[in-house]
């Protein structure tokens, strides 16, 4: 038997006095769901890979990420890390720099050429349409499960909207290319410049057993503005695509970008880098209502982009546009005021959102499209047998992290379907909320600041704006994790138990209670730093 801790009574009398008979409530060790994990659209086990990273086990941490997300170097740059907004550490000082650590691990994998092996071949073939984040994520997970995967992509490069809508200053292409290459090296066939016009015919021709459709929303949304033809009116999606192809882009002179999303700011910031005299974003609602991420707006303003909120473009004239001022009504909606002014302009760029081209799905039995979106069930299955869909073409938030999660979910559902099984979702554990934490046990450790180029330097070209954590900073940030809801063997419960009822099971094995001696006083619960012990009524 393990030696008991700090026994002050005679051993015999202590063991004879089974204080567990007094108990009306008992403590139970639990594993709660960390809020960062719960928030991640890609379903990463963030807490687990942070734990591995803080021990310096970088490859193990990377492989833990890769169980859910094949793109840590990409997502360490373009994900808007909502996990950090949910981080309980924010109640103590500031959230853990999860995104920066993920980027560090992703870059380590590229540097050291870590690889993922495919699964044992199943003999089943799956078609993926679209080589964006959703399609490539699905292909990756299917390959890990042993299926043969062919990805058909209409563009001449893989990456989808990560490549064609996110400029190089946010997403360096060498990192994007390396993470895509890793998937190809697993045996996934990626055919470029291969658009699909008829999904049913393509499946029949290739003798595919199932398909995942993730063609993305790659058509710019247009607005019929009255125009005299004196000012060029361009599409933001096409502008960013031309930038990727290094074609001449007419973003000189006075550029006005109409819209308030990330795409609008990517165009406006690109215009500054290309030497525009002025780069102005016009948005019909308030700045607080802008869908663009806060960091995008902040960095754009630092670089010289200007904003005109509560404004709308009513007419494009010769050398100028007409702007109408808006105001909020009693319900907070923007309404026209009739107050107009003309401002000089060389180019107007429409960044009003994207639409989908779903012509390839015409005539597929059972597949339903409403309002330009493919209707799917909770498992991303369409009404057509053997066909799943995800990413921007289904009803969901439109961002790369969500798309990656869709690809993973679809792959696992397709695998189960091909095996004649039904994939059951495990019950979701209780969330580890901030009020369960004893934050005074944790040392003060302010969040590390990620390096960022000075505005004057970053506007001179398309060099990456946000820098990397070095190894020391990545370790520091990983160690700021409080292990919310999950025991990390701090020994507090073992040390404070007055009845010596906590038994250590060895490194990595945690603890258990000896209920013969636990009288249910609850001291262990109140002193657990991370909320990993629950109080439950004693069975009668």
Image: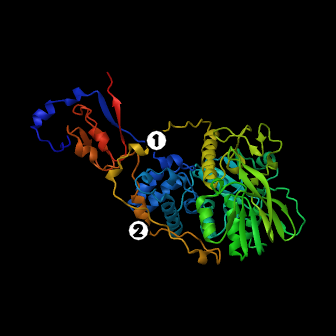
Residue 474 x, y percent position in the rendering: 44, 64
Q: Badge 1: few (under 14), some or many (20 or more) residues near its Cα, within 10 Å?
A: some
Q: Is residue 505 visible?
A: no
Q: In the image, is residue 261 above or below residue 174?
A: above
Counting every numbered tag in the picture gives 2
- Tell me which numbered mark, 2 or 1, is placed earlier along the sequence: 1
Q: Badge 2: few (under 14), some or many (20 or more) residues near its Cα, within 10 Å?
A: few
**Picture residue at 22% right of the left edge, 27% below the top:** 22
Disc 1 secondary structure class:
loop
Q: In the image, is residue 278 above or below residue 260?
A: below
Q: Is residue 309 visible?
A: yes
User: Which residue is under mark 2?
Assistant: 472
**Picture residue at 70% right of the left edge, 55% below the top:** 151
* Quadrant for the C terminus in the image: top left
Q: Depth check: 332 or 384 in front? A: 332
Q: Depth check: 171 or 442 in front? A: 442
In the image, 407: left or right of 480? right
Q: Depth check: 365 or 171 in front? A: 171
Q: Depth check: 183 or 398 in front? A: 398
**Residue 340 sits in which quadrant?**
bottom right
* Quadrant for the N terminus in the image: top left
**Picture residue at 39% right of the left edge, 46% below the top:** 486
Q: CA distance from mark 2 to mark 1?
A: 31 Å
Residue 413 x, y percent position in the rendering: 62, 42
The disc at residue 431 is 1
In the image, 215: left or right of 15? right
Q: Residue most toward the left?
A: 10
**Picture residue at 63% right of the left edge, 48% below the top:** 406
């Amino acid at each position: 038997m393990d030696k008991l801790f700090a026994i002050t009574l005679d051993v015999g009398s202590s063991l004879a006095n089974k204080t567990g008979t007094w108990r009306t409530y008992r403590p139970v060790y639990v594993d709660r769901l960390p809020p960062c994990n719960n928030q991640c659209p890609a379903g990463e086990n963030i807490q687990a890979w942070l734990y591995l990273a803080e021990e310096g086990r970088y490859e193990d941490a990377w492989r833990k990420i890769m169980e859910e997300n094949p793109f840590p170097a990409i997502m360490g740059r373009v994900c808007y890390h909502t996990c950090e907004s949910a981080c309980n550490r924010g109640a103590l000082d500031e959230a853990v720099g999860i995104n920066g650590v993920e980027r560090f691990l992703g870059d380590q994998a590229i540097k050291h050429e870590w690889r993922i092996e495919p699964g044992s071949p199943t003999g089943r073939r799956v078609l993926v349409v679209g080589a964006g984040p959703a399609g490539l994520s699905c292909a990756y997970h299917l390959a890990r499960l042993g299926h043969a995967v062919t990805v058909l992509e209409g563009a001449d490069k893989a990456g989808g909207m990560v490549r064609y809508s996110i400029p190089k200053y946010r997403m360096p292409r060498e990192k994007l290319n390396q993470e895509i290459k890793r998937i190809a090296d697993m045996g996934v066939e990626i055919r470029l410049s291969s658009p699909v016009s008829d999904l049913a015919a393509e499946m029949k021709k290739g003798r595919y057993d199932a398909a995942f459709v993730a063609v993305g929303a790659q058509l710019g949304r247009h607005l019929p503005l009255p125009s005299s033809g004196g000012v060029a009116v361009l599409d933001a999606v096409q502008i960013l695509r031309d930038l990727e192809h290094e074609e001449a882009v007419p973003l000189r002179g006075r550029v006005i970008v109409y819209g308030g999303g990330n795409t609008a700011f990517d165009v406006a910031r690109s215009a500054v880098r290309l030497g525009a005299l002025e780069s102005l974003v016009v948005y019909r609602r308030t700045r607080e209502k802008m869908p663009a991420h806060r960091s995008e707006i902040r960095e754009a303003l630092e670089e010289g982009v200007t904003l005109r909120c509560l404004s709308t473009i009513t007419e494009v004239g010769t050398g100028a546009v007409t702007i109408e001022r808006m105001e909020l009504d009693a319900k907070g909606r923007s309404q026209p005021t009739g107050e107009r002014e003309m401002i000089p302009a060389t180019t107007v760029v429409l960044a009003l959102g994207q639409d989908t081209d779903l012509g390839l799905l015409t005539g597929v039995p059972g597949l339903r499209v409403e309002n330009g979106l493919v209707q799917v069930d909770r498992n991303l299955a369409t009404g057509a047998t053997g066909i799943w869909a995800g990413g921007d073409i289904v009803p969901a938030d439109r961002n790369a992290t969500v798309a990656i999660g869709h690809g993973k979910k679809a792959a696992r559902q397709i695998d189960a379907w091909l095996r004649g099984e039904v994939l059951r979702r495990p019950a979701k554990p209780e969330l580890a909320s901030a009020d369960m934490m004893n934050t005074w046990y944790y040392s003060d450790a302010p969040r590390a600041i990620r390096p960022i180029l000075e505005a004057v330097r970053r506007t001179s070209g398309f060099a990456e704006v946000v820098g990397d954590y070095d190894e020391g900073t990545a370790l520091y940030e990983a160690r700021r994790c409080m292990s919310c809801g999950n025991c990390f063997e701090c020994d507090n419960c073992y040390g404070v138990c007055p009845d010596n009822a906590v038994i250590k099971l060895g490194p990595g094995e945690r603890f258990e209670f000896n209920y013969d001696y636990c009288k249910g006083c609850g001291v262990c619960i109140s002193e657990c730093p991370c909320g990993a012990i629950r109080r439950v009524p004693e069975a009668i």
